[in-house]
Image: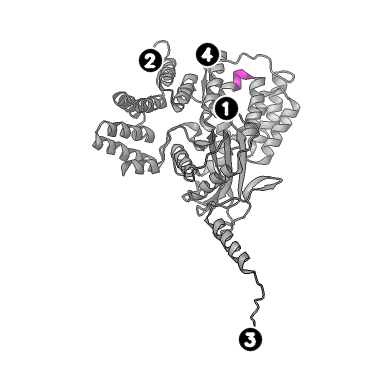
Amino acid sequence: MHHRVVPYFSIPAPATVLFFALFCLAASLPGRGQRIVLPGGEFMDTTVGRNPACEKIGYAPYFSVDGKYPRGSETLAADAQAFLRRNKRSYAGSGYVTFRFAVDCAGFRQPRTQVLQTGAHYQAFRFRPELVEELYAFLQTLKEWRTAATRDGQSANYLAYLTFKIQDGKVVAVIP
Amino acid sequence: MGKSLPLFLSLSLLLLAHRGHGQPAVRTVAPCGGQHHQDSLVARYLTNGAHRISYLSPRWALYCDSLIAACPTFAYAYQQKAMPLITTGQYQETFALLDQAVALDPDHWLAYRGFLKCIFTKDYEGALVDFGQAARLKPNGREMDHTYPFFRGLCQLELGRFARAEAEFSRDLAQQRGADGTGDVHFNTLFYLGVLHVEMKHYDRATAYLAQCLRAYPQHPEANYYAALACRAQGKEAAARQHLAAAQKALVAGYRLNEDNIFYANYPRQITEFEVRRAAR
């Protein structure tokens, strides 16, 4: 007598393959954001990071702890544009895409990230989502955020932002 | 001091917003019932209100809103509400408020808006328009320690229009030297003239301007960096390495381009240790 072993949770074979293929595809993409719209704004990611060592420390603005990313703006703009070019897609539109986030006291950028978009003349504007997601993917490649300290030597979490100035779909400047 | 630094920076930016007005404004009639009443509103909502807290506090905007409600034609109230927003990348809201300030009092706020476009949002075309209009309202005016032609030269340099940049920097030099030609020249005018001539591959002139800059401010990291690039282009590798070492040493020691707003935004061509290390490889 043959006993057929039935798994508690079974997935038909073709669906399993498709699921696995989609999972691999998703995993290979560079850091796609969630694009969540909340009353407080639009977010690429709403995940709240928890570093126990930083939990009881307050948040300073980037400018009070020398928290700008340690690259020149021209270097960042060139790197971001090279990042966009790597998949040979072209983009359109002019204006600003800003990501706002926190960096914890150990120098790790926290996943929760707000996104703001503004036209070249500071009017309401939206770029194609693919461009915003590519810029967010580039942001995720930046791993050398400063560990900040206040002037009295205390470790600090800090609030930072990075803006990409876009002209005709190309990154021409990074702020601050 | 750590906790008070944001407040200190807030206040320094406030003070800066009042600097650089080389000539008295044309406006003579204060809005909202005259100067005395206006002063009392400023004391109530700003001096004893917003200016006592960090401008990143939500209460800052509430104080400004109260002032605007009490005096909707007071340009300074709109500028005060706008100021924190530019430091957090909220450009749409920032410039909507600044446009109102400029519309109400262009003599006071047009060049300031041009400065923010030039340094913060790298909107060089927009800044050129604002500084052009500001120059017509206030010939020989200044903003944030510099002449209007300085910012126009910087914009033209970043737009790659080198001949126009050179012409603007010449006007900047003339304005700083004054009618008798003896006025001091800001070291960052000399620095950007050096950068301009590096871009134009006029390495001898670039080296001369950068050397002048470094005589005024020997630790200037960017001047040392661009002097290195000029030396390297001329085949003077040993001198280039000396300048790169000087730039690195200065950055490690905390020296910067030395402009008031570099806490908030990088000036064009501002470097970090990364760029120096890369050039030294």
Q: Where is residue B164 in the image (x, y as percent from the top left)?
A: 43, 19
**Dot 4 or dot 1, earlier in sequence:** 1
Q: Position of residue B121 (x, y in %)?
A: 54, 32
The circle drawn on residue B17 is 1
Task: Tell me the amino acid under the disc marked 1.
Answer: Ala
How far apart are labels 4 and 1 at the CA level? 19 Å
The Cα–Cα distance between marks 2 and 1, rounded to whole angstroms, is: 28 Å
Distance CA(mark 4)–CA(mark 3): 98 Å
The magenta stretch spans which residues? B105-109
The secondary structure type at the circle numbered 2 is loop
Quadrant of the drawing holding the N terminus of chain A: bottom right
Looking at the image, is mark 2 or mark 1 earlier in the sequence? 1
The chain holding disc 2 is: B
Tag 4 residue? B139
Magenta segment, prevailing SS (helix, strand or loop): helix
Which residue type carries mark 4? Pro
Label 4 residue SS: loop
* Residue B182: numbered disc: 2
